[in-house]
Amino acid sequence: METIIKGVRDFVAGNEIQMALDLCSSKLFLYLSVAQKDSLTLMHRDYHDILGKLAENSINFTDAQVETTKISRRILTLLNKLESEPEIAFERFNIEKALLIRSFNYAFLERTKFRHEVISHISTKISKTLLINGGPKSGISYLEQFLRHFSEINNDTNIKIIPINMEKILNSPTSGKSAKILEILFANIGEDLPATGDDIKFIRLGNALREVVHNNEMFPIFFFHDFHKAMFIPEDVYRLIYELINIPTNCLFIFSGLEYNSIPNWNDIRNSCRFDEISAKDITKETIVDCFSVIFNQYEENIINSLGGKHIQCDEYCSLVSEKIFVDGEELDICKVGNIINDHLFNLKKY
């Protein structure tokens, strides 16, 4: 990243603004936060406007130079920000493929598609719904960790993660499940739940969401999780989900573990959704060894301390772990693998 930044600075110093912007877009883009990407796009547009006005003789050369200097300063400000937080910039660069996120948490299964969908949606601010399915211990619980991590490394974008535990709501003995969900949604965008019929509530919710996004007060990501643990999903909740998917606003709804084919009039809204399946088939011996190799590289000191100071190489470490996971004649068990990794990382915290 340092070499690229130096190249951009050289272009700015030589007043080659288009070259500087192009280098930022081609080589620095993945290091940028969502807000910084928006800023870079705006700089491209503003510079093209200057060139267009010069070609039309609607601006004189001196004024064009003044405006170009402003863009140069904006580029340098962007570079200074990247240089001030290199670790965060590198985390953004690796966000779609990193096996480990946050301290002692793991991604494990390759979830490139899901991550790409989330990042693409927030970057383009196009209204979408993501539907995520997967079996027990397939890693659905990881998704909230990923979302929180993504919001932390894009802390200039006002992303707000709003997790909604559907198991807790749906398995509670109280009635009015959809009303409870609506109350949570309104409360998290700073609005009171209107004392009106459901149709008006949906309209008010849509308007309120559009307003908070438009005013850059926040970018809400509503993460409805653990549907698969619910004993029963009432009709009013299905209708609420249908209406949320239909809301034309630039926020993100993620539903995990939901049997979406049960939503009434599903065919009317399915084209508004994106889908991701976390499958046990994604697990291979290679992906598991890759995961433990990353764990070793990041937590080598903890691992050595856990062995009483005995030094161990990565290959030997992965071999020891493999003995616990891969048993001849036994099919790979995703629950077993998930528990081993969870327990292992939990124990490493002590060292």
Image (tube, rainbow, N blue to C red):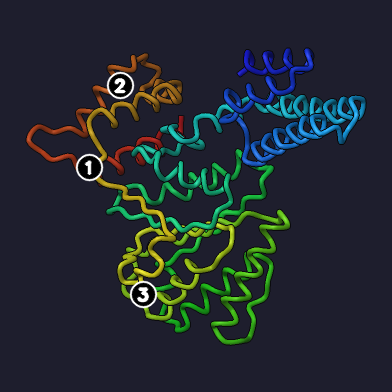
Compared to residue 120, the image places residue 13 above or below, namely: above
In percent of width and height, residue 273 lies at: 42, 58
Name the foreground residue: 77 vs 272. Answer: 272
Q: Residue at x 37, y 51 (%)?
A: 140
Q: Residue at x 56, y 48 (%)?
A: 122
The residue beneath circle 1 is 281
Q: Amino acid at mark 1?
A: Lys
The N terminus, quarter of image: top right
Circle 1 Cα neighbour tier, 10 Å, few/some/many (<14 / 14–19 / ≥20): few
Name the foreground residue: 75 vs 80. Answer: 75
The residue beneath circle 3 is 265
Q: Is residue 90 left or right of residue 115?
A: right
In the rendered image, the residue lying farthest to the front is 56
Mark 3 or mark 1: whose residue is earlier in sequence: 3
In percent of width and height, residue 309 lies at: 40, 17
Does the residue at mark 3 contact the one at mark 2 (Cβ under 8 Å)?
no
Determine whether the residue tagged by mark 1 lies in a helix, strand or loop. Answer: helix
Name the foreground residue: 248 vs 66. Answer: 66
Q: Residue at x 40, y 54 (%)?
A: 274
Does the residue at mark 3 contact the one at mark 1 (Cβ under 8 Å)?
no
Quote the CA–CA distance across marks 1 and 2: 24 Å
Compared to residue 310, the image places residue 58 above or below, namely: below
The residue beneath circle 2 is 317
In percent of width and height, residue 247 lies at: 54, 68
In percent of width and height, residue 220 lies at: 59, 57
Res 298 quadrant in image: top left
Q: Amino acid at mark 2?
A: Tyr
Mark 1 or mark 2: whose residue is earlier in sequence: 1
In the rendered image, the residue lying farthest to the left is 329
Q: Amino acid at mark 3?
A: Asn
